[in-house]
Amino acid sequence: MSGVGDLLDRRALLRRAGGAALLGSGVATLAGCGDFSPKPGREAQAVAARSIGLDVASYYPPITDLRRLVQARAQARGANVLLSADAAGSTAQLANLRQWTAARSGFHALVIAPFDAAAVDPLAAAALARGVAVVSYAAPLKHQSAAVGIDPARSGRLLARDVNGWATHQPAGLVQVLLVRPTPGGAAPDPYVQVAPRAETALRGALATSLLQPVAATTATAAADATAAVARALSDFPAIRVVLCWNDTTALGAAAALTAHHPASERARLYVGGQGAPALSGRASLDALAGNGVLRCLVAPRLRDLADALVDVPFGLLHDQHRSDVPAPLLALTRQSPQLADYRGDYRAA
């Protein structure tokens, strides 16, 4: 959306927040972090304590690690950030956002990972009309000041490039491929489901058709249901040796099913790849990638980069820095990637 600079009047913003010391200081005011010093008036304190609201699926992995990294970045930047604690799903999110987008909410910027972009968009539009910056995360909104997330089409192309390279070193002949898609209306809703089809379209378009042949698709959300779904697909297409997944947790389940289906002597001829959605869910998939199994590639941004952007983009808007969409840098990680240790370091061991 154009005209981001018209959304916010910096002087008015600073007056509402109780002065430049509250928004520009090096001390963050996070939820539960205590009082300001020196203390402003009660109303200014309440507003400044809630300058940026992040509604980013508070129940969904990797929220624990993301929250920790966001809070560290907020403290380093002197940003005032409050993360949502609403329950799962669109209904709970809409209830929270109705409060956060109300005229007296005190928020000056909101970051939203919409479960249902069409339902959230009227609230986002109303917030923009009141001078609140709106930053989308994971899935775009029609009405927004900027976006943070990944480019799903680029993610699909990066995974295709890696599996294409792997396939060139396999014996001659087409390799059968299984695709794992999100489960429509799954029990664990995920904002990225809305844009995952773009990643698959790009992935399919970039596959080397002389080497790799998609023969089937299935749906899954996490490791357990992916193991079962891939096993069922293998019973119908026993020659499948490549499984490409929409997220990293389904890739773990696919790897288990593919390994169980083929003899150990064929392990070098098996490939599982997954994508971050928009971030890897935890260390388990990275640990598996570092091992000697059939999980060979994960395409994702580094979690710390995402956390930094979730603070930097809305904070920049509050300070009149005109920002547009900010795609997080994507990397096709393999077990040989030198960045693998840094990626794993962003997640605390379970």
Image (cartoon, grey):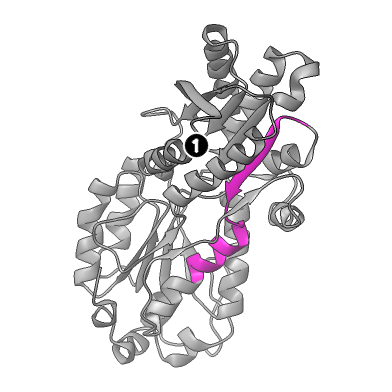
x%, y% of residue 73?
Answer: 59, 71
When the figure is inspected, residue 170 is found, relative to residue 333, above or below; the finding is above
Q: Residue at x 62, y 21 (%)?
A: 241
Q: Is residue 26 above or below residue 167?
A: below
Residue 14 forms part of the magenta stretch: no
In the rendered image, which quarter contains the C terminus? top right
Query: Picture coordinates of residue 47 (x, y %)?
Result: 38, 76
Q: Which residue is mark 1?
A: 207
Depth check, front residue: 230 or 320: 230
Residue 39 visible (yes or no)? no
Give the residue displayed 38% in from the left and 75% down from the top: 323
Q: Amino acid at mark 1?
A: Leu
Give, as a single range, the part of the protein colored magenta.
Answer: 293-311
Q: Secondary structure at mark 1?
A: loop
Q: Residue at x 45, y 57 (%)?
A: 149
Estimate how packed mark 1 is, as few (under 14), some (14 to 19) or many (20 or more) residues with alpha carbons within 10 Å.
many
> Residue at the spot x=66%, y=37% of the render?
166
Percent x, y for residue 339?
Answer: 72, 57
Count of numbered circles on the image: 1
Would you say residue 252 is visible in this rendering?
yes
Asked if the magenta segment contains residue 310, the reply would be yes
| In-image side of 302 versus 142 (left or right) | right
Q: Nearer the viewer, residue 66 or 252?
A: 252
Measured as percent of width and height from the top left, residue 167 is found at 63, 33
Q: In what quadrant of the picture does the N terminus appear?
A: bottom left
